Image (cartoon, coloured by chain):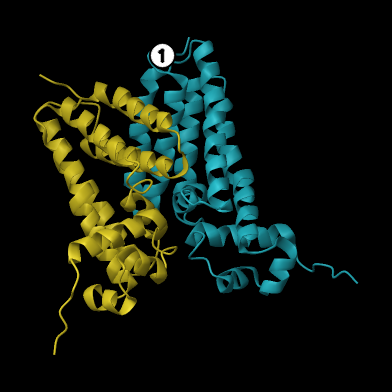
Chain colours: A yellow, B cyan
Amino acid sequence: VARTASFDRDVVLDALMTTFWTHGFEATSLDALERATGLKRQSLYNAFGDKEAMFLASLAAYGEQVGRPLQALLANDDPRQALQAYLEGHLKILSDADKPAGCLFATCSSELGARDDRLGSQMRVETQASLDALNVIFRRWADQGNLSAEMKPETFAALLTAMVRGIALLARSINDPDILENAVDGALQVLQPSIHVK
Amino acid sequence: VARTASFDRDVVLDALMTTFWTHGFEATSLDALERATGLKRQSLYNAFGDKEAMFLASLAAYGEQVGRPLQALLANDDPRQALQAYLEGHLKILSDADKPAGCLFATCSSELGARDDRLGSQMRVETQASLDALNVIFRRWADQGNLSAEMKPETFAALLTAMVRGIALLARSINDPDILENAVDGALQVLQPSIHVK
């Protein structure tokens, strides 16, 4: 007889995600995942698979809840407003005292991205996919005459990605919100001259 | 009778540093440290202390060998040349196929910087110290009229720190050297207008 899961999968997944976001992959113990979810490991295994599978499910949930809405902010018709919303959206999440420090994706791509295994491969694929998505957006800006002729779309994509990941990384090791605000203000200040609004 | 260490401490420390640089703190096993150094754990404990102590010694060695020389590149009298040398210096290390991917400090401040323990505290102290050092340099640039009036020294310091850490983070999860070059070129391109050379 198949057992019926007696818990809300989304609530449990949220607790798993928050635990990995707090500690990273390696430092997250099965004990911590049990405590966060209130479930025994066998129930977690049955529902999600092993620790790697729980992590990958958390990463996907983070993409849905955090990554995708942030990227959607770049869809604004006015590219200056889009860029401002995108950077300020990052600042808002990174400053949210109810969330773990930093960005799950930045933290774990740094921790796992150089590994020669399934997790490393997944982090590399997702990093490239997120760069590709920005490339598409900024090529469109360039085609519309919204990107300065001296700024190549792929340069802008790599630079903006490095900036938001770097700001997320600072948020992991700096408690001072002024420093994050400075970094975001500075990013806006130096990037805006590359954007032309007609 | 005190035992005499029969190994070159600097060579062993270099092997420890390279191992932590490759894997981060948590994913570095004592087995890996033994393999990298050719020493048994008891010899390592006698010479350095426990794994945390080996990590902190590695971090200090990394600061000497990598962090300090990079920061010294900002001392050039011409601030545009200084900034270019600083960013290209990061690119050179991050592109060095003989070194582990990324930056030990960026990787481990992301992994450990939010922890409520001795390691977390050390990463926060060092992150703040490196920001403070850049603040001093850029305040001098501002006093000398080398920084645009619209660019606050602390904004420039936070932004540049986020950029180089973010580029280091990309180097961990992207194998394509063109993307790192794009990010560094873009950083130079958007930062240089804030620097005035008289």
Residue B182 in sight = no
Which quadrant is home to the N terminus of chain B? Answer: bottom right
Q: What percent of the width, then of the height, locates residue B56?
A: 62, 53
Camera-side residue of B30 and B119: B119
* Disc 1 residue crowd, few under 14, some 14–19, many 20+, Cα 10 Å: some
Q: Left of B198 or right of it: where is B3?
A: right
Camera-side residue of A2 and B61: A2
Residue at the far right in the pictured view: B1
Quarter location, residue B75: top right
Q: Left of B168 or right of it: where is B71?
A: right
Camera-side residue of B173 and B96: B173
Q: What percent of the width, then of the height, locates residue A103?
A: 33, 48
Quarter location, residue A43: bottom left
Above/below status of B47 relative to A155? below
| Residue at image location 38% in from the left, 52% down from the top | A107
Residue B109 in sight = yes
Q: What percent of the width, then of the height, locates residue B158?
A: 44, 30
| Residue at image location 28% in from the left, 36% down from the top | A92
Dot 1 falls on a residue whose secondary structure is: loop
Residue at the disc numbered 1: B148
Q: What percent of the width, then of the height, locates residue B186?
A: 33, 33
* Amino acid type at mark 1: Ser
Quarter location, residue A11: bottom left
Above/below status of A126 relative to B153? below
Q: Left of B161 or right of it: where is B40?
A: right
